[in-house]
Image (cartoon, rainbow, N blue to C red):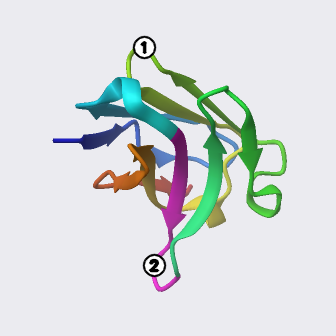
Amino acid sequence: QVQLVESGGGLVQPGGSLRLSCVVSGSIFNIDNMGWYRQAPGKRREWVASIGRDLSTNYADSIVKGRFTISRDSAKGSVYLQMNSLKPEDTAVYYCNAVVNTQPYWGQGTQVTVSS
């Protein structure tokens, strides 16, 4: 049974930073791509960043603009998202995604609120 659990969300002021974490349980040695998505109220879920098994990274440049960094620790089945220079428009529920044995799995999401 593959499960993803995110943590690290919260309330932060504009310009602040947060580090999101996601831990995968079950079949951690068969994880291919891992990534982060987000969904703001009333909007569709959108892709933010992804990282491959070879640690190659891709970002939604229109969103990230050099502010976010994705990383992973494959031995721990974990993926992280370091978010800096946060803006109110970054407010959303952030979801972790992992492809395990070609199947996509999702976490339950963690709320990020950027507000003064």
Q: CA distance from mark 1 to mark 2?
A: 34 Å
Q: Is residue 110 visible?
A: no
Report helix, strand or loop for mark 2.
loop
Q: Quadrant of residue 8?
A: top left
In screen coordinates, is 58 left or right of 103? right
Please state which of residues 13 and 23 is positioned toward the viewer in this rendering. 23
Give the image location of residue 11, x and y in percent.
44, 48
In magenta, the rendered stretch is 33-43
Cβ atoms at labels 1 and 2 below 8 Å apart? no
- Which label sits in the foreground, 1 or 2? 1
Residue assigned mark 2: 41
Give the image location of residue 104, x and y in percent.
40, 55
**Residue occupying the far left of the picture:** 1
Give the image location of residue 58, x and y in percent.
75, 45
Q: Is residue 29 visible?
A: yes
Please state which of residues 3 and 64 is positioned toward the viewer in this rendering. 3
Q: Is residue 76 above or below residue 46?
A: above
Give neighbour class at mark 2: few <14, some 14-19, many 20+ (Cα, 10 Å): few
Residue assigned mark 1: 75
Please state which of residues 16 and 5 is positioned toward the viewer in this rendering. 5
Dominant SS type (magenta) = strand
